[in-house]
Image (spheres, rainbow, N blue to C red):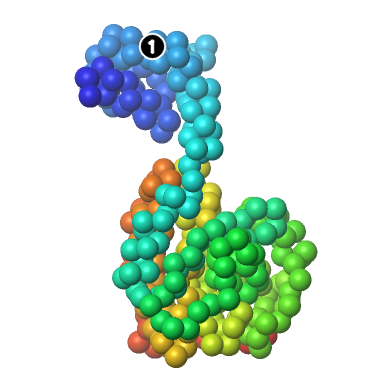
Amino acid sequence: MSQSVARALDLLDLVSRGVRTLEALAEEAGVHKSTVLRLLQTLESRGFVAHDAGHRYRVGPAVFALASDALDAVDVRAAASPTLRALAAETGQTVHLATYQDGVVTYIDKVESRQGLRMYSRIGLPAAIHATAVGKVLLGGLDPAERERVAAGLDLRAFTPRTHVTVDGLLADVAISAERGWAEDHEEHETFMNCVGAPVHGPDGRVAAAVSISVPNVVLPHEGVLALLPALLAATARISTELGARTAAPSPASAPSTSAPTASAAPKGTP
């Protein structure tokens, strides 16, 4: 990469992070002001930066147009596919990828486990928002007002005695899940199945998709499924990076200890 191109990209990055004046940009970049001004003028001529009357620089419209085009071109399923398959190979369990649109959570990819027992889920089928880990993750990614509106309109059908059947109970669980960065389906959709799910973030920081690991009770107990969380969080961080998100590496501390029961692992019952 030429030095001028590298410096221009560095300046664009600095402007995007809030460095506004010519003097501050020159100091941060370690480049003479005349060189910075020349590069900024070039970027401005192409619409990548703009400045106000006080000569404070900001990101220009070309950046947003480029980002929008890039987002349209990104296929979440294609970006996630290698990591989903690696996660399934590492854990030996069923892995799902799901997205949300207009009140519906849909499975868009699935990697079957090595076990003989198969789940009902199929690519292209909707997932029960209130009774699946991916559903809770994606519901938690909505703005609070939209989250409440969607939850209020759900058919809170009881699949098992553990299924959430009240809006308040569901929203409380979703809020906890969003705060800690992962959700679970503890025998809430099928009495013999436990799942953990985590969000995939897009370039704008919003939740773009959800990944889950699903395991029958005969293969692993609930605590064993929770022990798969570090692998799941590492996988969703990798996919988020592929989509252009700026995410920190997940910490094993994000997962609960399985040496003793935790509040999140305790049976919820019917709220």
- Residue 256 seen by the camera: no
Q: Nearer the viewer, residue 160 or 254?
A: 160
Give the residue drawn at x 75%, y 67%: 154
- Residue 214 seen by the camera: yes
On the rendered image, what quadrant is the C terminus found in? Answer: bottom right
- Vertical relation: 164 (above or below) 52: below
Residue 252, horizontal then vertical, whole percent = 33, 69
The part of the image, by quadrant, that contains residue 2 is top left
Q: Residue flagged by tag 1: what amino acid is it?
A: Thr
Horizontal side of residue 7 vs 22, given as left or right = left
Q: Nearer the viewer, residue 200 or 7?
A: 200
The part of the image, by quadrant, that contains residue 104 is bottom right
Horizontal side of residue 143 vs 60, given as left or right = right
Q: Which residue occupies the extreme front position in the image?
A: 116
Residue bearing mark 1: 42
Horizontal side of residue 204 vs 26, given as left or right = right
Residue 74, horizontal then vertical, whole percent = 48, 42
Residue 36, horizontal then vertical, whole percent = 31, 15
Residue 156, horizontal then vertical, whole percent = 73, 74
- Vertical relation: 147 (above or below) 37: below
Number of disc labels: 1
Q: Nearer the viewer, residue 87 or 196?
A: 87
Give the residue drawn at x 71%, y 82%: 158
Secondary structure at badge 1 equals helix
- Vertical relation: 55 (above or below) 104: above
User: Local crowd at mark 1 within 10 Å, few (<14), some, or many (≥20)?
Assistant: some
